[in-house]
Amino acid sequence: MADEAPAISRTIQLLDPRAEDVPEELGLSSPLPSLEGKVIGLLENRKYHADAFLQELQNVLVDDYGVKKVVYATKFTYSAACAQETIDALTQECDAVIHGIAD
């Protein structure tokens, strides 16, 4: 009788694509009645051309809408969540924050 090959055991690992954490739903903030004299935060995600878009948006906000000040911040990378200290700084200093993306 010939030697039989040993049985091969295979394992298939299934991954669950759903997020592990359920984000806290905060809802929408009250709309600003006007941008005149407000401080607006611009958060860039570092995608290609996001900086150019947000620079132009900054000019429009200041020149056309009377925004008093624009605070510019960047994420470490577009694929990661924004650092909590960046979010905290923007929300403390700004009346509104715009998260800009581009490609």
Image (tube, rainbow, N blue to C red):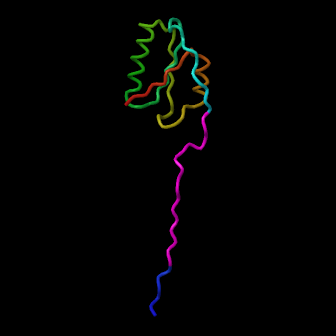
Dominant SS type (magenta): loop
Residue 36 on image: x %, y %:
50, 6
Residue 24 on image: x %, y %:
62, 32
Residue beneath the point at 48% across and 37% down: 79
Q: Is residue 47 left or right of residue 30?
A: left
Of 88 and 98, the residue lying toward us: 98
Q: Is residue 48 left or right of residue 75?
A: left
Does 20 appear in magenta?
yes
Residue 41 on image: x %, y %:
52, 18
Residue 75 on image: x %, y %:
51, 30
Can you say whether 47 is above or below 5 in the image? above
Q: Which residues are magenta?
A: 7-23
Can you say whether 54 is above or below 103 in the image? above
Q: Is residue 102 left or right of residue 36?
A: left
Does 56 appear in magenta?
no
Of 23 and 102, the residue lying toward us: 23
Residue beneath the point at 53% across and 53% down: 15
Q: Quadrant of residue 95?
A: top right
Q: Quadrant of the C terminus?
A: top left
Can you say whether 67 is above or below 89 in the image? above
